[in-house]
Amino acid sequence: MARAVCPHAHGHTLAQWHGAGAAEAAQAIEAALAARKEWASWPFEDRAAVFLRAAELLAAERDEFNAATMLNQSKTAHQSEIDAVCEAVDFLRFNVRFAERLNEEQPLSDSAAWNRVEYRPLEGFVFAVSPFNFTAIAANLPAAPALMGNTVVWKCASSSVYSNYKVARLFERAGLPPGVINFIAGDA
């Protein structure tokens, strides 16, 4: 069992967590593969709605996420507001808009040929490894590929488990189905 501690006060335990080993990593991969076809079949608008809902929840619950980032990454209130809330909300909202634009842009067609691009998720899953120092990047790395219909195994830095776990739970509360983003924590 590992402890999530404040970098500025190592004696202050924020949480205790179990590190994922090979068995847990295999379970996360299996869950991602099992959820892949169903999640990919969701219309883009429905997938986007989950992440827009997550952005709204995050903006509404900013104090909790700021506090988690302040404690878990030793950020000031100002730094945390910029990183954990503002930037993460922007990533979630901008990703939806950028994906909409990507889907809208189509190759030129003429009277002889109709050209069309359809984006589809990757075969398999995406493995996202997030850094210790930015909650917003940790939220964005698994969310961006999931928005596009991919399933994800998300391995966060062991020193940021506390704040990153809160983001994983936020995605669940926003309506992300089980197996789409699989949060695991453990040694590098």
Image: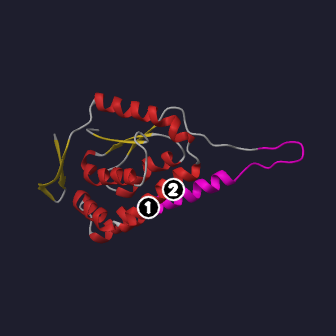
| Mark 2 or mark 1, earlier in chain | 2
Q: Is residue 137 left or right of residue 46?
A: left
- The picture places residue 22, in percent across and down from the top left corner, at 29, 28
What is the x, y in percent for residue 4?
Answer: 19, 50
Magenta stretch holds residue 47: no
Secondary structure, magenta segment, majority class: helix
- Which residue is at a point 53% across and 54% down the rendered structure image? 48
Q: Which residue is mark 1?
A: 55
Quadrant for residue 77, please give it: bottom left
Residue of label 2: 49
Q: Which residues are magenta?
A: 88-115
Residue 173 or residue 20, whichever sits in front = 173
User: x and y percent of residue 180 in the render?
Assistant: 44, 42
SS under mark 1: helix
CA distance separating discs 2 and 1: 10 Å
Circle 2/circle 1 CB separation < 8 Å: no
